[in-house]
């Protein structure tokens, strides 16, 4: 914690970390929102705040509705914590409607674009590392943070699955296919030893040119370079591969509940966005194929 926060906020942030076990990034975003709110109330006690203060704060944020919704979620969570701890019996967020959010259909790759992305030239140990990462990411739909934190003990080659720790330290098991298995074994057995540097003994599977675990930024750069060399015009992030995994499974007939489990979504409504993607694709197919769908 950078600033000297009120004791109640310190305890709240500690609760998020040690009891609710939220990820460091999530805790950081909550802390930043609370810091901006404290700057707004300018020295007022957090327990003097009324509903109109919260509404004024949200109204003055030149942000998207999604960001305003996040502010309201954080403040509501904080005040509910304060009520539970006996600091107050009033929640100024109660009764404020959540900003209406328009669900954006996630960006995903076509089958042809996935083939372009995965079929990279294999010349160096780094190429084989990248190939193994991409194949595993598309085969499992895991988050990039889950991929980059994978260790030897997370992979079961006998049963063809990986064990990942997702949001909230929730563990899940994801199967992988023969193609990803082939390149992961090839990388681990032949090429990863070439990336290990003397005196460094990391358990993470994927290493960079310094022999340390590859970072998110490093992986983003790799994806960007592949897109440039293969001529893919879309802005591809690791999350786009996750979206592609889910969309292609759904198009192939996979049950939505199965996709939910594989992705590690706690709520089925989060997974249902992919049904919209599938329906959009059906509509495009219909409009391009039906003889009476063309405008006269």
Image: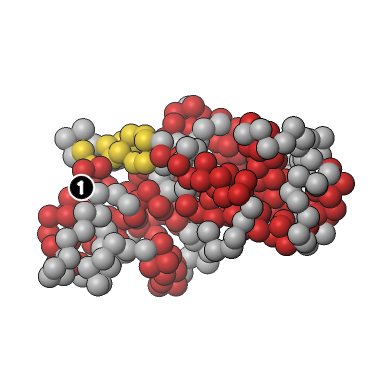
- When the figure is inspected, residue 270 is found, relative to residue 237, above or below; the finding is above
Of the pair 171 and 96, the residue shown nearer to us: 96
> Going by the image, does 67 lie left or right of 23?
right
Name the spot of residue 246 as percent of width and height, x first: 48, 41
The residue under the point 25% across, 42% down is 154
> Going by the image, does 101 lie left or right of 191?
right
- When the figure is inspected, residue 194 is found, relative to residue 7, above or below; the finding is below
Of the pair 46 and 146, the residue shown nearer to us: 46
Name the spot of residue 274 as percent of width and height, x first: 57, 39
> Going by the image, does 104 lie left or right of 119?
right
Residue located beneath label 1 in the image: 152
Quarter residue 292 falls in: top right
Name the spot of residue 180 as percent of width and height, x first: 27, 47
Secondary structure, mark 1, is: helix
Q: Total number of numbered labels?
A: 1
- Asked whether residue 14 appears in the rendered view, the answer is yes
> Going by the image, does 154 lie left or right of 266?
left
Of the pair 28 and 225, the residue shown nearer to us: 28
The residue under the point 17% across, 55% down is 188
Name the spot of residue 128 as percent of width and height, x first: 23, 62
- Asked whether residue 61 appears in the rendered view, the answer is no
């Amino acid at each position: 914690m950078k600033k000297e926060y009120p004791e109640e906020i310190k305890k709240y942030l500690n609760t998020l970390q040690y009891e609710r076990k939220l990820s460091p990034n999530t805790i950081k975003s909550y802390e930043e929102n609370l810091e901006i709110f404290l700057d707004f109330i300018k020295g007022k006690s957090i327990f003097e705040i009324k509903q109109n203060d919260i509404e004024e704060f949200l109204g003055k944020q030149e942000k998207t509705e999604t960001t305003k919704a996040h502010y309201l979620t954080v403040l509501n969570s904080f005040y509910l914590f304060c009520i539970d701890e006996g600091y107050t019996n009033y929640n100024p967020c109660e009764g404020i409607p959540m900003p209406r959010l328009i669900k954006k259909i996630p960006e995903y790759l076509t089958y042809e674009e996935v083939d372009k992305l995965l079929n990279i030239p294999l010349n160096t140990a780094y190429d084989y590392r990248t190939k193994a990462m991409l194949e595993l990411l598309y085969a499992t739909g895991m988050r990039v943070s889950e991929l980059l934190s994978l260790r030897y003990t997370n992979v079961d080659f006998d049963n063809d699955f990986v064990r990942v720790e997702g949001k909230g330290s929730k563990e899940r098991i994801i199967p992988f296919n023969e193609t990803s298995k082939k390149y992961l074994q090839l990388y681990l057995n032949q090429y990863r030893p070439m990336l290990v540097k003397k005196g460094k003994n990391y358990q993470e599977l994927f290493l960079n040119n310094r022999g340390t675990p590859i970072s998110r930024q490093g992986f983003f750069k790799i994806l960007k370079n592949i897109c440039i060399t293969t001529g893919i015009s879309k802005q591809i992030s690791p999350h786009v591969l996750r979206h592609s995994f889910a969309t292609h499974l759904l198009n192939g007939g996979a049950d939505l509940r199965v996709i939910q489990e594989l992705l590690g979504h706690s709520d089925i409504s989060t997974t249902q966005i992919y049904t919209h993607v599938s329906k959009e694709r059906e509509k495009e197919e219909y409009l391009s194929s039906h003889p009476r769908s063309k405008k006269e």
